[in-house]
């Protein structure tokens, strides 16, 4: 098995990407390709003990940055590490790609270079969502702002296969985000999607109100990419704000400061529950290839875990399973 | 000035509604009408010192419960406290209505009985949203799942007038919730709405990502009712989950328990920052009448503050101001 890493993608590239790749080679006995600037990659590689024959470098002169516009970056920066990595998957020289680079460009590249699985109208991003019970999968995390009912059905199928095969959740429950649990409530698109999902090939549990998402009520949380983006970013912003305000209160007098110091380990354990580096990244489901988007601020551990995620993805034939379930729907639903 | 209270609406009715009304009469020297079951209201009134000539009771035999379907409840329960209260505003026997009852029914009743301000296509709910800097206004909080671009413009106008005149925010900033701050990002509807808002009669600050909402980046947060509902409910659910998990961590060993006990007042002060009872309720903006939806679990203090909010609403001619600004848009935009 061979995984290609966009060695220049992410805030900590190429330090974290090379280190993560070296560790993954050691831990999982796989081959990796590092796409990126060769001298810079060699400089990083020199720091670690590594089996050189299991690591290939594909040199590229360009880097897609977070400031680049997605589609034009993919079209114009043909000698970038991201484009090179995607092409290696397309040409079957690699089985999976991991990138912590520009999300929009990676999604555009996935669509343009890898293409879609037959029958899938809209591939979607499926990031992990931390809940009281562990991790759920949110799909779509932001790839498609405007969705048709049929797209939400596809998200349910893809999210369910992924949750079962990669996250090892048995019979994952699938819910559609809505403003009420009643079938007749919500936007026109969600109401139509509900009807389709009721006969979808997964464990459909109905609607979920946003209130119940953090409680872990659904394993797979289905919504359009606009709503998904709002859910992910609001969660991030709200957690930040709550901790900022708590901190303000906790240092207001000496007694509180003592209390806070006694709780330091508790706060750390709390934060550990949401450590994204443990969970790898977000797969872009529905494209013809295994594509894992690692967090932009990924460290070596996060890169290594994203690679591990890619391996499980390949080993469990997630793409074939999605393709089969989509075909099984019959033309009347998918077209 | 005379405010009618749906005395039977809410989890704590009629205890909280009657007490809140009595206190409002004392504090603000207004007249109130209590719509509801007369013997039950009299029983509550007997508990308090009150100026009887400032309190009128309009007896009704029915109650709209949270289980009732909104539109049919309004149409069929004609002798309910909610319908009676709305009719009193319609007939100008009261200047404002406060209800803590069934939200859907109240919105349906507002539309059916009070009607819309000329030029307003979709009235919207505008609840307060707690941020690091105080309170913002979220509009639409859930009245309209499907919106047109023009509706978001209306929400901006109504939210801005309300924030300025009732919440006393000078030149309130207005933002549209979107998946990026760039004008060209987002759903088709939001992109169109952005263009309209740029020439809207308010302090338009552009798009806001959900991440920046809790930080108080915008005074008026504009979105469709689906997104608004997701924002409000996710905020509620996430805050609950965070505190549940923190609590779990804080009692894990004796040292942490001591720490937590020292921080008890800090946690209380933290929660006090988000005390909705201080802020009254959510106005239903765009209908021809002052309609304040108080929280379902309102206590007497929350009811009293919702009444105060209604008073400020009337005193500052919010409805006339909205009507004027809508008319000023010109036919090409509003039709």
Image (tube, coloured by chain):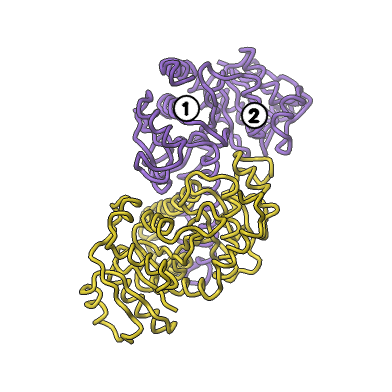
Chain colours: A purple, B yellow
Up/down of B319 relative to A62, above or below: below
Residue A112 sits in quarter: top right
Q: What element carries label 2?
A: helix
Q: Where is residue A72 in the image (x, y as percent from the top left)?
A: 74, 29
Q: Which mark is residue A106?
A: 2
Whether labels 1 and 2 belong to a single chain: the reply is yes
Query: Does residue A188 show up?
Result: yes
Camera-side residue of A160 and A3: A160
Image point (44%, 82%), residue name: B28
Camera-side residue of B318 and A253: B318
Up/down of A324 relative to B140, above or below: above
Screen quadrant of the N terminus of chain A: top right
Work out how far the residue at label 1 is from the one at label 2, CA to CA, in angstroms: 24 Å
Q: Residue B20 carries which label?
A: none
Q: Where is residue B75 in the image (x, y as percent from the top left)?
A: 32, 54
Q: What element carries label 1?
A: helix
The local crowd at label 2, few if under 14, some if 14 to 19, many if 20 or more residues have their Cα within 10 Å, is many
Residue A297 sits in quarter: top right
Q: Where is residue A46 in the image (x, y as percent from the top left)?
A: 71, 27
Up/down of A295 relative to A23, above or below: below
Query: Does residue B262 show up?
Result: no
Q: Where is residue B236 in the image (x, y as percent from the top left)?
A: 43, 54
User: With A79 as the anchor, is A49 left or right in this view?
Assistant: left
Residue B174 sits in quarter: bottom right
- Along the polypeptide, which appears first: circle 1 or circle 2? 2
Up/down of B250 relative to A54, above or below: below
The local crowd at label 1, few if under 14, some if 14 to 19, many if 20 or more residues have their Cα within 10 Å, is many
Q: Which chain carries label 2?
A: A
Figure label count: 2
- Which residue is tagged 1? A150
Q: Which chain carries label 1?
A: A
């Amino acid at each position: 098995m061979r995984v290609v890493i966009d060695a220049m993608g992410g805030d900590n590239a190429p330090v974290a990407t090379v280190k993560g790749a070296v560790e993954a080679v050691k831990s999982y006995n796989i081959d990796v390709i590092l796409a990126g600037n060769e001298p810079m990659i060699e400089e990083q590689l020199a720091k670690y003990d590594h089996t050189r024959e299991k690591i290939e470098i594909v040199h590229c002169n360009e880097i897609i940055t977070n400031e680049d516009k997605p589609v034009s970056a993919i079209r114009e920066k043909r000698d970038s590490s991201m484009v090179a990595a995607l092409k290696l998957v397309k040409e079957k020289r690699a089985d999976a790609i991991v990138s912590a680079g520009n999300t929009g460009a990676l999604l555009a590249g996935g669509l343009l270079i890898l293409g879609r699985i037959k029958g899938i109208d809209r591939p979607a991003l499926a990031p992990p969502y931390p809940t009281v019970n562990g991790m759920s999968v949110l799909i779509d995390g932001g790839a498609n702002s405007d969705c048709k009912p049929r797209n939400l059905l596809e998200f349910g199928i893809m999210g369910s296969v992924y949750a079962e095969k990669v996250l090892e959740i048995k019979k994952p429950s699938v819910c559609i985000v809505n403003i009420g649990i009643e079938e007749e409530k919500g936007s026109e698109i969600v109401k139509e999607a509900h009807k389709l999902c009721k006969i979808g090939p997964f464990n459909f549990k109905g609607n979920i109100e946003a209130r119940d998402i953090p409680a872990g009520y659904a394993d797979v949380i289905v919504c359009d990419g606009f709503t998904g983006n709002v859910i992910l970013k609001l969660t991030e912003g709200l957690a930040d704000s709550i901790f900022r305000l708590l901190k303000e209160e906790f240092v207001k007098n000496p007694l509180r400061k003592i209390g806070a110091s006694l709780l330091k380990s508790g706060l750390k354990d709390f934060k550990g529950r949401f450590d994204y580096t443990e969970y790898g990244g977000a797969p872009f489901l529905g494209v013809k290839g295994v594509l894992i988007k690692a967090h932009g601020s990924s460290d070596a551990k996060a890169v290594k875990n994203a690679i591990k995620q890619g391996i499980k993805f390949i080993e469990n034939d997630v793409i074939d399973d999605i393709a089969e379930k989509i075909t099984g729907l019959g033309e009347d639903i998918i077209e």
